Image (spheres, rainbow, N blue to C red):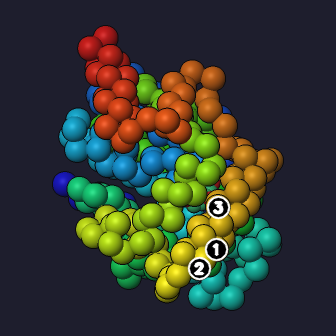
């Protein structure tokens, strides 16, 4: 099943110009299937976990970071400043972002064009974090994300899913790991022979690395970018990255991927068995 929301409809509604996301938006009893919220910093493994849970439980996998990235790409292409909210909001109102969940992640269409790989590049990564500080822009995103997940049966991944998008999500997981571990994982995603079958959403740029010195420099640069983004995401005034009070925190610093997946599955199963 693909999910191709036509965001152009939302964009043409008057409230899209001055979006007002309500604090508690939805009605869990109106959903037949749960919302699984996965939040956490960059490189913690959210996308891998979200894709796994979606496959395991037959849910849609929706990657909200891709929406910020797609809009950031449009801002880059149109030479917009990242620190001026009004023009960005106007741009958003004339933008159609479509997430197409696949087995291994989301295919992302920006105004009908597949930008799934382009949006993983460094300039877009940095721009996405910068535009995501704006209040009304976030409200615009949140409205669309709530519409996408309203029927439930979704694993939604991002920074504010459990705190702002679906504060009433049935399952909330906050996936964290030490910055050095996340940086190293991101670095290894850029090394082609360690990543022979890239996932849909892992088109991260591979620097042309020759020597071990260059490797170390490349890894350090990734860690620097990641810490900078962490700082901005955690300290912005609007929906800063933080665990919801009722989220289960999984720190994967010293855990294998299999352990993370098994613990997260157990969390979801325990909800499903009591629902
Ligand atoms: O998950 P990601 O790395 O693709 O996200 C890119 C940026 O988008 C991230 O630095 C912060 C922002 N973002 C956000 O503010 N809220 C979300 N729900 C998802 C992403």
Place residue 131 in its image quadrant.
bottom right
Q: Is residue 31 visible?
A: no
Depth check, front residue: 225 or 20: 225
Q: Give how far across and how far down residue 85 sits, in percent.
A: 76, 68
Quarter of the image that includes the C terminus: top left
Q: Give how far across and how far down residue 70 sits, in percent.
A: 51, 71
Residue drawn 46% across the image and 79% down it: 206
Circle on res. 217: 1
Examine the rendered structure and indicate whether residue 259 appears above or below residue 154. above
Q: CA distance from mark 1 to mark 3?
A: 10 Å
Q: CA distance from mark 2 to mark 3?
A: 14 Å
Examine the rendered structure and indicate whether residue 8 appears above or below residue 240. below
For label 2, the residue is: 214
Q: Is residue 133 left or right of residue 173?
A: right
Q: Which element carries disc 3, helix, strand or loop?
A: helix
Q: Give how far across and how far down residue 208 sits, in percent.
A: 49, 86
Q: Crowding near pointer 2: few (<14 within 10 Å), some, many (20+)?
A: few
Specify which label sits upstream in the sequence, 2 or 3.
2
Q: Is residue 271 visible?
A: yes
Depth check, front residue: 37 or 187: 187
Q: Crowding near pointer 1: few (<14 within 10 Å), some, many (20+)?
A: few
Say which of marks 2 and 3 sits in front.
2
Place residue 52 in its image quadrant.
top left
Q: Give how far across and how far down residue 232 sits, in percent.
A: 75, 55
Question: Across the whole image, how many numbered discs are drawn on residues?
Answer: 3
For label 3, the residue is: 223
Residue drawn 51% across the image and 24% down it: 248
Q: Which element carries disc 2, helix, strand or loop?
A: helix
Q: Are marks 1 and 2 in contact (CB under 8 Å)?
A: yes
Examine the rendered structure and indicate whether residue 106 appears above or below residue 25. below
Specify which label sits upstream in the sequence, 1 or 3.
1
Q: Is residue 180 left or right of residue 166?
A: right
């Amino acid at each position: 099943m693909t999910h191709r929301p036509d965001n152009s409809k939302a964009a043409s509604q008057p409230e899209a110009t001055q979006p007002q996301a309500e604090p508690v938006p939805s009605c869990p009893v109106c959903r037949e299937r749960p919302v699984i919220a996965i939040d956490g910093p960059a490189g913690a493994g959210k996308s891998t976990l979200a894709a796994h849970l979606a496959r395991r439980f037959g849910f849609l996998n929706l990657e909200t970071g891709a929406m910020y990235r797609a809009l950031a790409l449009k801002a880059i292409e149109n030479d917009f400043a990242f620190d001026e909210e009004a023009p960005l909001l106007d741009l958003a109102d004339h933008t159609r972002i479509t997430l197409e969940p696949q087995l291994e992640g989301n295919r992302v269409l920006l105004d009908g064009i597949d930008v799934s790989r382009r949006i993983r590049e460094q300039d877009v990564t940095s721009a996405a974090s910068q535009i995501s500080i704006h209040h009304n822009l976030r409200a615009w995103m949140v409205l669309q994300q709530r519409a996408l997940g309203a029927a439930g049966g979704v694993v939604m991944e991002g920074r504010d899913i459990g705190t702002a998008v679906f504060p009433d999500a049935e399952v909330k997981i906050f996936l964290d790991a030490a910055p050095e571990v996340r940086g190293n994982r991101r670095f290894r995603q850029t090394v082609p022979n360690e990543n022979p079958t890239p996932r849909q959403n892992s088109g991260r740029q591979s620097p042309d690395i020759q020597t071990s010195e260059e490797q170390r420099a490349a890894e350090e640069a990734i860690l620097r970018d990641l810490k900078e983004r962490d700082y901005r995401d955690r300290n912005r005034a609007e929906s800063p990255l933080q665990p919801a009070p009722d989220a289960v925190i999984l720190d994967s610093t010293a855990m294998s991927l299999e352990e993370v997946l098994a613990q997260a599955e157990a969390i979801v199963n325990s909800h499903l068995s009591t629902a």
